[in-house]
Image: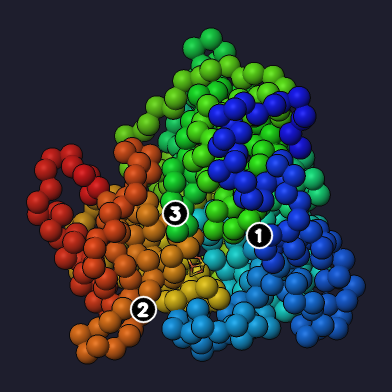
């Protein structure tokens, strides 16, 4: 909580006055202003675990309290999945309980994207035994399973936790998974390894009741890679590796990014954090969000709205004066890399002389059997470490040079490619209507089919291109920052029928020249027209492109 010695200035009071009633705890607004705030006040989401273990898993789905089912169970990575067969036109019409299936999506958090062979094998086995073989690599380095029965959840937790994994705060209004560079600790060009900071954040923050009731979700990222490989611009707080001229390697601090329906890029605070500072600053930013974040309206509750009102200078002042109780050094901004691909796909030499290999499935869809086989292949080729990426891809680390080629061949036999087409490499898809209750359209199968179709139609296309397929406006697969962003909605076809389709956003990107894609007015394509449309856009771009010009320019 903010300390009482900081008195707001007159200007601050005027500004606060305009936002009186935003539901900020720091302004004394502890009375819940909406149903979500109410259920969080009624009981900490973390407490639902005991009820799952002692009641719900024994008595079955129907015994689950609705406030736990649609609220607190998220604190343990559990969402009810969409009842099969309900079309997207009904998403906004039906009551939540009419959309609920009796099975769950389970999100396993993979902080820093770090996995051992044993951990990946365990996830693969859980998928095959309890999740009908389902498994998706997410664009926040997590792994999600579907078709989970409440009866099996305690056993799944037991197995995950026995190998050091968890689903704690994988969803909900909490500090979610902390993104990390997939090549932390191994890359030859690394500025600084952020892994110790991520581990300390996990130890200090995750599952800590002091931070288990935030206004909304809180996303964090730490990367010391010069490739800026953790989409730092769209996290609530991000730490990006920089070399300070006097203080040496450390991190540039960014806050207030996020996509969804009102996208905003994060801003630099101009502050430099040492490796040891990172957990302190992370904790302080979470504290600011908890205390000052807007709780009245869910759609204004992300940190980005507070930052939009405060600006980075005031945010930094509050951070230092009220939470850290010390000042941070000013620091340089990161150098933006020229590379468009930052996903670590392919074969790369590590700084210890061994190699890491990055490979791609289609749109992050794998399955439990494949995960188990990837784990076995890593072990057979002398590795015990794997990483997930923010592009729904995966890496195997620590491979000796003479094992690279056999590993490449073995992965290819699983249709996991080290040199994928630009389309397979650059296309992501969110969960979509297959399992997501908020979805309006299908995404995964359509994204995979689009990849296949574009490979067939444009075999020579080798420009970096990102195509992000989303099932609704929520932007889980980052609609606004793709070269071609597709937002799922119902559209009218040539016969006047309402069918699945997409609103198109063109020319977004992160890293080099970050910005949001243009929503092309009136440009909506039906799902059926999608391959033709994308082919046309890419063909025109290839034909008219100047030397060195990127898609977004
Ligand atoms: Fe579900 Fe929409 Fe997120 Fe896709 S973007 S996973 S449809 S909420």
Residue 389 versus residue 509: which sits nearer the camera?
A: 509
Circles 1 and 3, Cβ within 8 Å, touching? The answer is no
Task: Give coordinates of residue 422: x percent, y percent.
Answer: 30, 56
Q: Secondary structure at mark 3?
A: loop
Tell me if mark 1 has few (under 14), some (14-19) or many (20+) residues whose alpha carbon lies within 10 angstroms of its own.
Answer: many
Q: Tell us which disc is closer to us: 3 or 2.
A: 3
Task: Give coordinates of residue 474: x percent, y percent.
Answer: 48, 63
Q: Is residue 87 visible?
A: yes
Q: Is residue 448 visible?
A: no
Task: Give coordinates of residue 434: x percent, y percent.
Answer: 51, 78
Choose top left, top right, bottom left or bottom right for residue 112: top right
- In the shown orientation, is residue 501 left or right of residue 155? left
Q: Residue furthest left?
A: 544
Q: Residues under labels 1 and 3: Cα distance?
A: 20 Å
Q: To which residue does mark 2 refer?
A: 490
Choose top left, top right, bottom left or bottom right for residue 178: top right
Q: To which residue does mark 3 refer?
A: 262
Q: Is the N terminus in the top left, top right, bottom left or bottom right quadrant?
A: top right
Residue at 25% from the left image edge and 47% from the top image edge: 552
Q: Residues under labels 2 and 1: Cα distance?
A: 28 Å
Q: Residue furthest right?
A: 54
Instruction: Indicate whether 37 appears above or below 293.
Output: below
Q: Is the C terminus in the top left, top right, bottom left or bottom right quadrant?
A: top left
Residue 14 versus residue 113: which sits nearer the camera?
A: 14
Q: To which residue does mark 1 refer?
A: 171
Q: Tell us which disc is closer to us: 1 or 3.
A: 3
């Amino acid at each position: 909580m903010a300390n009482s010695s900081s008195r707001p200035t007159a200007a601050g009071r005027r500004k606060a006055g305009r936002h009186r009633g935003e539901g900020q705890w720091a302004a004394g607004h502890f009375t819940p202003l909406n149903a979500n705030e109410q259920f969080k006040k009624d009981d900490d989401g973390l407490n639902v675990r005991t009820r799952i273990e002692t009641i719900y898993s024994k008595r079955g789905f129907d015994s689950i309290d609705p406030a736990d089912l649609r609220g607190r169970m998220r604190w343990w990575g559990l969402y009810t999945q969409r009842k099969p067969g309900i079309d997207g036109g009904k998403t906004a019409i039906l009551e939540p309980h009419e959309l609920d299936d009796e099975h769950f999506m389970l999100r396993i958090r993979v902080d820093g994207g770090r996995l051992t062979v044993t951990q990946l094998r365990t996830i693969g086995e859980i998928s095959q035994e309890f999740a009908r073989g389902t498994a998706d690599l997410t664009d926040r380095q997590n792994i999600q399973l579907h078709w989970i029965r409440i009866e099996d959840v305690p056993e799944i937790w037991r197995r995950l936790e026995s190998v050091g994994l968890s689903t704690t705060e994988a969803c909900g209004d909490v500090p979610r998974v902390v993104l990390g560079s997939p090549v932390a600790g191994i890359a030859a060009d690394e500025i600084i390894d952020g892994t110790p900071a991520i581990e300390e954040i996990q130890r200090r923050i995750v599952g800590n009741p002091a931070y288990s009731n935030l206004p909304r979700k809180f996303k964090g990222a730490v990367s010391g890679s010069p490739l800026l490989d953790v989409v730092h611009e769209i996290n609530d707080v991000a730490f990006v590796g920089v070399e300070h001229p006097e203080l040496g390697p450390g991190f540039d601090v960014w806050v207030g990014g996020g996509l969804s329906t009102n996208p905003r890029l994060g801003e630099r605070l101009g502050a430099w954090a040492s490796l040891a500072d990172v957990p302190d600053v992370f904790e302080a930013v979470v504290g600011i969000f908890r205390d000052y974040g807007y709780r009245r309206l869910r759609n204004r509750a992300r940190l980005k709205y507070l930052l939009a009102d405060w600006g980075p200078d005031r945010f930094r002042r509050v951070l230092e004066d009220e939470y850290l109780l010390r000042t941070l050094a000013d620091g340089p901004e990161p150098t933006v890399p020229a590379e468009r691909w930052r996903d670590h796909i392919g074969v790369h030499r590590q700084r210890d002389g061994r190699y890491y290999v990055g490979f791609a499935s289609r749109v992050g869809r794998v399955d439990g059997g494949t995960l188990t086989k990837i784990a076995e292949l890593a072990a057979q080729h002398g590795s015990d470490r794997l990483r997930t990426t923010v592009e729904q891809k995966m890496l195997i680390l620590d491979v000796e040079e003479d094992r690279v080629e056999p590993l490449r061949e073995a992965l290819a036999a699983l249709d996991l490619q080290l040199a994928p087409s630009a389309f397979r490499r650059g296309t992501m898809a969110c969960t979509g209507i297959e399992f997501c209750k908020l979805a309006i359209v299908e995404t995964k199968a359509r994204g995979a089919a689009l990849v296949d179709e574009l490979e067939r139609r444009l075999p020579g296309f080798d420009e970096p291109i990102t195509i992000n397929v989303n099932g609704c406006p929520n932007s889980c697969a980052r609609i606004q920052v793709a070269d071609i962003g597709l937002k799922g909605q119902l559209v009218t076809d040539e016969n006047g029928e309402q069918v699945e389709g997409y609103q198109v956003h063109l020319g977004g990107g992160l890293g080099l020249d970050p910005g949001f894609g243009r929503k092309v007015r009136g440009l909506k394509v039906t799902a059926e027209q999608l391959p033709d449309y994308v082919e046309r856009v890419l063909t025109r771009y290839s034909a008219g492109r100047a030397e060195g010009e990127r898609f977004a320019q």
